[in-house]
Image (cartoon, rainbow, N blue to C red):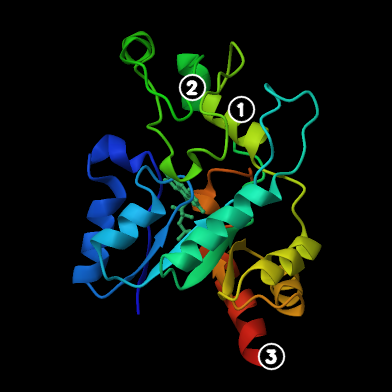
Amino acid sequence: MPVMIAPTSLQKLANPEGEIATARAASACNTIMVLSTSSTYSLEEVAACCDAIRFFQLYIYLALPELFSIVYKRRDISAKLVQRAENNGYKAIVLTVDSPRLGRREADLRTNEILFQFNVIHEKLLLMHPILVVPPLKNLEGLLPTKFVSDEKGSGLAALASGTLDASFCWEDITWLKSITNLPILIKGVLTREDAIKALEVGVDGMIISNHGGRQLDYSPATISVLEEVLHFTYCC
Ligand SMILES: Cc1cc2nc3c(=O)[nH]c(=O)nc-3n(C[C@H](O)[C@H](O)[C@H](O)COP(=O)(O)O)c2cc1C
C-alpha cells in the first residue's frame, strides 16, 4: 500500500484545509497517511475526518530555552503525543531521526526573516513579515509555550527547531519509546547500512529511507543512491 507523508503546517499556506485535504485524499486512494507532529490540524481532527490508515510522525521535544534558563528534555510532551495517537487509532509511530538541526535556509537568511510565531498568528506581524508566519501547531497546544520569537537575524524556523527539538535523542532512547507504546515504531531518515543494522538491533519495526528532502544536512547522499545498500542488508537479515 502506498504511503503519503503530509509535510506539515506549511501545507496550510497552500491549502486552507491542510492535512484534512490530505487525509481525505488518502482515504480515497487507499493510501496510508503519515501525519506530522507539526500539523496545523490536530491529530484528533484528522482522525475524525477520514478512515484512511494513519501513522503519526513524532519529534522529540525540549523546553524552549527562552523561557527556561536550563534546557531540559521534555519526554513527557512526546509521550503525550504518542498516547493521543494511540487513543485516536493511529497504527504506527514514525520517529523522524534525520533533523536534529535544520539546514542552512538561505531563503530565510536572504529575506532576513526576524520573527517566527509559534502557535500564534498576529495579522499585524503578517503584514510586517509576510515571508513566513507558520500557522498554529495544534498538536502542541497546551504542551509547549505558545509564543516563540527568534533571534534578530537568520531563520526563525531553524531557531525554533534548535530550541525545541532534542538533538541528543539516540539509539538508547528508542528503548524508552518502545516502553511507552504498543504501536509499531518506524524510523524515518535512515541512510546507511550501519544505521539499518543498529535500528534492527534496538527493535524498530520498520525504516523509511529518507534524507528529509536533501534540505537538512549538507552532503547527505541522495536516497536512491543508498537504497540498494540498505535494502540489500534488510533482505539478508
Ligand atoms: C514543507 C515541508 C515540511 C516537512 N515537514 C516534515 C515534518 O514535519 N516531519 C518530517 O518527518 N518530515 C517533514 N518533511 C520532509 C518530508 O517528510 C520528506 O522526508 C521529504 O519531502 C523528502 O521525501 P523522502 O523522505 O521521500 O525522501 C517536510 C518537507 C517539506 C517540503
Which mark sits nearer the N-terminus, 3 or 1? 1
Mark 2–mark 1 CB contact (< 8 Å): yes
Camera-nearest label, 3 or 1: 1
Let me know if residue 211 appears in the view.
no
**Residue 86 coordinates in the image, percent (x, y):** 49, 67
Q: Residues within 10 Å of mark 2 (few under 14, many from 20)?
A: many
Q: Which residue is mark 3?
A: 237
Residue 114's label in the rendered image is: none
Q: CA gap, disc 3 to disc 1?
A: 40 Å
- 60 horizontally vs 125: left or right: right
Q: Residues within 10 Å of mark 3 (few under 14, many from 20)?
A: few
- Type of amino acid at the residue the image marks with label 2: Phe
Label 1 residue SS:
helix
**Residue 75 coordinates in the image, percent (x, y):** 69, 50
Q: Which residue is mark 2?
A: 116
- Type of amino acid at the residue the image marks with label 1: Ala
Residue 159's label in the rendered image is: 1
The quadrant of the rendering that contains the N terminus is: bottom left
**Residue 158 coordinates in the image, percent (x, y):** 58, 31
| Residue lying at 29% horizontally and 35% vertically, measured from the top left | 13
Let me know if residue 168 appears in the view.
yes
